[in-house]
Amino acid sequence: MKTALTIAGSDSSGGAGIQADIKTMTANGVYAMSAITALTAQNTTGVTDIVEVTPEFLGKQLDSIFTDIYPDAVKIGMVSSAGLIKTISEKLKFYHAKNIVVDPVMVSTSGSKLLQDDAVETLKNDIFHQAILLTPNIPEASVLSGISIINEADMIKAAKIISKEYGCAVLCKGGHSINDANDLLYYNHEYRWFIGDRVDNKNTHGTGCTLSSAIASGLAKGMDLQGSIEFAKEYVSGALWAMLDLGKGSGPLNHVWNVYTDAKIINK
Ligand SMILES: Nc1ncnc2c1ncn2[C@@H]1O[C@H](COP(=O)(O)OP(=O)(O)OP(=O)(O)O)[C@@H](O)[C@H]1O
Ligand SMILES: Cc1ncc(COP(=O)(O)O)c(N)n1
């Protein structure tokens, strides 16, 4: 069985973060492991508190994982402070981690800040150059590129700036667009659109976490980058089409839509 590791924050409501990642990897046949950066007290309406682990404890989790069950791919999600980012950077280098997908989580759908301002530079300098792929959403791509993004041409421009700066592929996700859900991949002076029909579903908590961990699952199974993105996009679309409706706010996706027949409530 292929293996994948998520380094991210815990979402007590189970829709995003570590929980979304483990569900996604498991539903796609990959053995999932986790190194938890922080606990969030969170539900579909918002985040009420965050408790970080210490960099030392995060380092011990990573040592335990890499010295025993080596991950075929690594997904990095919420890492809120510079000390934790530095620990991840050192450990990933030390263990020669491969297939690293970074979702530069900055703000939750519900509006809470999940990355401290002074940690953005550390994330850029210490992590991005180790990644095979960065998956910013439109607001994150705007912060990372320094340009405002209002149309598809801007998405290409921003992804190109980020890709050139950090020498890795960049997938600018279009979930924050209004009319469609088209994601833009830029790498090696080339770009490609991954076209997605917009699903009319208000429950989109954890779409970004789910997409990046599905991409990591694809890479772990030996798919190439573009094949992994195609597969991940189909998986997220299916999980939105399944129309799970839980909680009072923006609810979670149905991560097992592709596994259980009785979970396939597809309204397509
Ligand atoms: N309503 C939708 N219909 C279809 N696809 C969607 C929809 N919303 C988001 N997506 C897709 O989900 C993936 C995540 O995109 P999005 O831009 O929402 O990321 P994000 O903002 O990081 O997510 P998160 O809500 O977890 O923070 C992308 O592939 C995007 O195209
Ligand atoms: C622990 C954790 N990680 C990531 C997100 C982002 O997901 P979303 O933007 O859907 O709230 C989150 N809310 N919580």
Image (tube, rainbow, N blue to C red):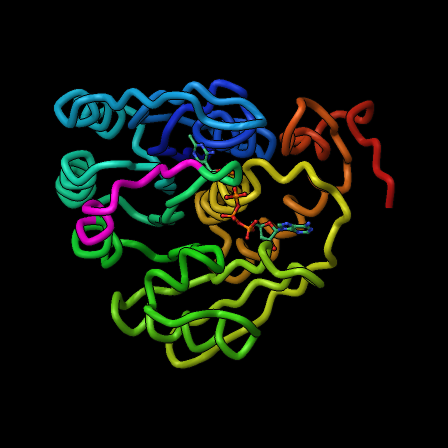
Image quadrant where residue 194 sits: bottom right
Residue 53 percent across, percent down from the top left? 23, 21
The answer to whether 149 appears left or right of 200 in the picture is left
Name the dominant secondary structure of the magenta segment: loop
**Residue at 57%, 42% in the rendered image:** 207
> Is residue 113 in the magenta section?
yes
Question: Is 249 located above or below residue 116 in the figure?
Answer: above
Q: Residue at x 86, y 46 (%)?
A: 268
Q: Which percent across, then down, holds residue 8?
A: 36, 32
What is the total number of numbered labels drawn onto the structure image? 0
- Residue 151 falls in which quadrant of the image? bottom right
Q: Is residue 197 left or right of residue 148?
A: right
Relative to residue 217, is residue 227 depicted above or below? Answer: below
> Eyeballing the image, is 66 above or below 175?
above
Residue at image position (16%, 45%) is 93
Q: Residue 76, position in %: x, y?
A: 35, 41
Magenta range is 112-122
Front position in the image: 205 or 240: 205
From the viewer's perspective, is residue 82 above or below residue 69?
Answer: below
Nearest to the observer: residue 260 or residue 233: 233
The quadrant in which residue 5 appears is: top left
Is residue 119 shown in magenta? Answer: yes
Q: Is residue 149 left or right of residue 231?
A: left
In the image, residue 4 lies at what x, y percent?
41, 35
Residue shown at 48%/18% (left/top)?
Answer: 12
